[in-house]
Image (cartoon, grey):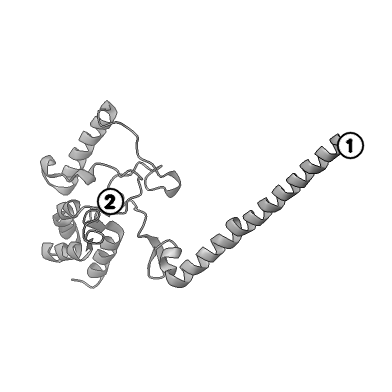
Amino acid sequence: MTTTSTLRGALTQLGAAARALAVMTLLLGLAYPLALTGFAQAVVPGRADGSLVERDGQVVGSTLIGQSFAGDRSYFQSRPSAAGEGYDALSSSASNLSPANPEFVAEVRQRIKDVAAFDGISPADVAPDAVLASGSGLDPHISPAYAAQQVTRVAEERGLSVEVVRDLVADSTAGRVLGFLGEPRVNVLELNLALDAVSDRGH
């Protein structure tokens, strides 16, 4: 009798646990995500879809994830990325190398030389984010200082005036969030698309 009662009690508890698991799975694993997705699609559809950017009907990227412009001198360059092969959203990460690591130090020094030569400036004038990756490796922004550093090179490659390119940078620069959080920043993809639009108009 005792064994039978114990077994029945265990089965009752197991059944209750299974029902609770099924209910919570439906609520939190299905109903809640669907409700949030529906709400986001209704209120901020662009963000809900990943803040995708289109040009001529084709998706060319996202405002939330950076991308490399592969050393193309006619485009503003993004900061380095240690995420996979670069800006891989499935491999978001930093290099995890210490600032004192000899490999890291040598890599940064080489980047400084390469960026200085690429932009035609002194190594002492290279912006820090031109040679240092972000913690996620996916940062779509660069500092206004790094953007300004590239203006002359981009203007020359595009056959545009420095003033026009500088104005594009200013228009693409976002200030601090709420006026005091973070730092001013420039979205590289949006800036390059604006640059293409000006070039296509022949200005």
Give the image location of residue 188, x and y in percent: 27, 57
Nearer-N-terminus badge (2/1)? 1
State the residue in front, 14 or 142.
14
Give the image location of residue 182, x and y in percent: 24, 53
State the residue in front, 13 or 109.
13
- Disc 2 on helix, strand or loop? loop
State the residue in front, 178 or 161.
178
> Which numbered circle lies on residue 90?
none
Q: Amino acid at mark 1?
A: Met
Q: Residue at x 61, y 59 (%)?
A: 27
Could one spot residue 75 in this view of the protein? no
Structural distance between the alpha carbons of marks 2 and 1: 74 Å
Q: Quadrant of residue 55?
A: bottom left
Q: Quadrant of the C terminus?
A: bottom left
> Which numbered circle lies on residue 78?
2
* Mark 1 burial class by Cα count in 10 Å: few <14, some 14-19, many 20+: few
Give the image location of residue 156, x and y in percent: 15, 58
Q: Quadrant of residue 60?
A: bottom left
Residue marked by disc 1: 1
Q: Amino acid at mark 2?
A: Ser
- Disc 1 on helix, strand or loop? loop
Give the image location of residue 38, x and y in percent: 52, 68
Above or below residue 136? Residue 59 is below
Q: Residue at x 26, y 41 (%)?
A: 132
